[in-house]
């Protein structure tokens, strides 16, 4: 991403896609994890082929502006929800219903106090505001007697363990029909999750012209993920933290990668930082993505409702691609229903049909 995409984006295994890798490809379709890695590599090749052509630009242009802005807002709200969970402000109870923690809880106090500190430092334009907030939140957590997450060492980490997954992908015993269905589903999810994420983040960094190169860099990393033994990669939502701190070029992603390597030996220090000191940053970054909502027109319901669906369903379904899919399908359906189908580009209808097929394949 640093060398080719030249964008302040961070690539890591997708937290929704790794669930699809495990529960859909392996448990649902009966693939071995080695076969699923082969599917990942093939999806990377398909993604790379798309990103090298003009199709990737046409995909972006086919998406209405209102939906592009809605994706940014939806991702922002998902960051807020992740931050609230991570900070212990809201917790899922035994019935999987969100429960609000007592405001007398020390963890909640630290989270909200650190959030306030983050906002104040940012508004005062203090250099290194986010990092200073994390440090301040860590000190505050220790004063309240909050201990960091368990595990203050590498826990037996060894480079040799990578030998168990590196280069272990295989097509042996994988039926052609199953391979096609698996590659189609995974490619669809990977492409449109990255289209939504990368477009939103590049707009946030005011560098939309780097979209195609950023997509190419991401697609190449998806191809490599199958070889290196991990589920497919995506541009992460946390990249917004670097962008909000001033990241505008590939140097941001380069230094992030270097710091991740250093973290292997600095883990005992890093794990001293409690979740309550990090969660407020996610909540704050989510707030920075909210202004995009002003560019959405809610006067026309056939445009406003699909945008609302994306904004609501991305965080509530904990899935960027499912939220996008519901918004796209409803946008096409509503425009046909009110007789305005000519306002929608043919490619967008095709994309919507692909999402319908994606949901059908999940059912069967």
Image (cartoon, rainbow, N blue to C red):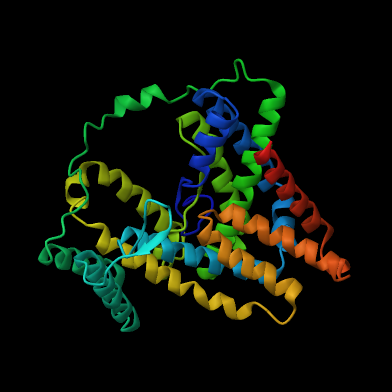
Relative to 325, is 89 above or below?
Answer: below
Residue at far front of view: 95
Is residue 135 visible to us here? Answer: yes
Quadrant hosting residue 57: bottom right
Q: Nearer the viewer, residue 171 or 84?
A: 84
The answer to which of 251 and 106 lies nearer the viewer is 106
Q: Nearer the viewer, residue 112 or 76?
A: 112
Q: Position of residue 245 (x, y in %)?
A: 37, 69
- Where residue 259 sits: x, y (%)? 30, 50
Instruction: State the image quarter where residue 341 is shown.
Output: bottom right
Question: Is 240 displayed left or right of 127 in the figure?
Answer: right
Residue shown at 14%/66% (left/top)?
139
Residue 247: image location, x then y, percent: 42, 65
Q: Is residue 337 above or below residue 55?
A: below
Q: Residue at x 26, y 46 (%)?
A: 263
Taking 185 as reference, is 244 left or right?
left
Q: Is residue 194 toward the left or the right of residue 162 in the image?
A: right
Residue 166 location (% of width, % of height) = 43, 26
Q: Nearer the viewer, residue 237 or 175?
A: 175
In the picture, the quarter occupied by the C terminus is: top right
The total of numbered circles placed on residues is 0
Residue found at x 50% / y 34%: 22
């Amino acid at each position: 991403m640093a060398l080719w995409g030249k964008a302040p984006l961070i690539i890591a295994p997708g937290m929704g896609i790794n669930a699809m890798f495990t529960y859909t490809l392996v448990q649902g379709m009966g693939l071995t994890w080695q076969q699923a890695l082969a599917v990942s590599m093939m999806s990377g090749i398909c993604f790379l082929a798309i990103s090298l052509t003009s199709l990737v630009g046409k995909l972006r242009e086919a998406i209405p502006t209102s939906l592009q802005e809605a994706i940014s807002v939806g991702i922002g709200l998902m960051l807020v929800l992740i931050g609230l969970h991570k900070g212990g402000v809201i917790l899922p109870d035994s019935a999987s219903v969100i429960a609000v923690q007592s405001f007398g809880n020390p963890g909640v106090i630290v989270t909200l106090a650190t959030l306030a500190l983050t906002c104040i430092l940012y508004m005062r334009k203090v250099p290194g505001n986010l990092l200073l907030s994390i440090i301040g939140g860590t000190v505050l957590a220790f004063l309240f007697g909050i201990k960091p997450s368990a595990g203050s060492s590498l826990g037996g980490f060894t480079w040799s363990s990578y030998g168990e997954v590196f280069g272990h992908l295989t097509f042996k015993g994988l039926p052609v029909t199953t391979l096609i269905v698996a590659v189609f589903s995974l490619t669809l999810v990977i492409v449109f999750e990255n289209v939504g994420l990368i477009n939103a983040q590049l707009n946030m960094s005011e560098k939309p012209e780097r979209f195609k190169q950023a997509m190419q860099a991401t697609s190449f990393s998806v191809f490599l993920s199958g070889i290196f033994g991990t589920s497919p990669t995506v541009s992460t939502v946390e990249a917004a933290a670097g962008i909000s701190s001033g990241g505008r070029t590939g140097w941001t992603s380069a230094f992030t990668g270097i710091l991740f390597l250093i973290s292997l030996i600095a883990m005992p220090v890093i794990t001293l930082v409690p979740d309550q000191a990090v969660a407020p940053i996610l909540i704050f970054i989510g707030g920075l993505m909210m202004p995009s909502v002003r560019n959405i027109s809610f006067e026309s319901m056939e445009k406003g409702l699909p945008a609302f669906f994306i904004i609501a369903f991305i965080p509530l379904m904990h899935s960027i691609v499912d939220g996008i899919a519901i918004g796209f399908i409803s946008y096409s359906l509503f425009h046909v229903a009110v007789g305005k189908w000519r306002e929608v580009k043919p490619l967008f209808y095709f994309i919507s049909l692909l999402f319908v097929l994606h949901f059908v394949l999940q059912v069967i």
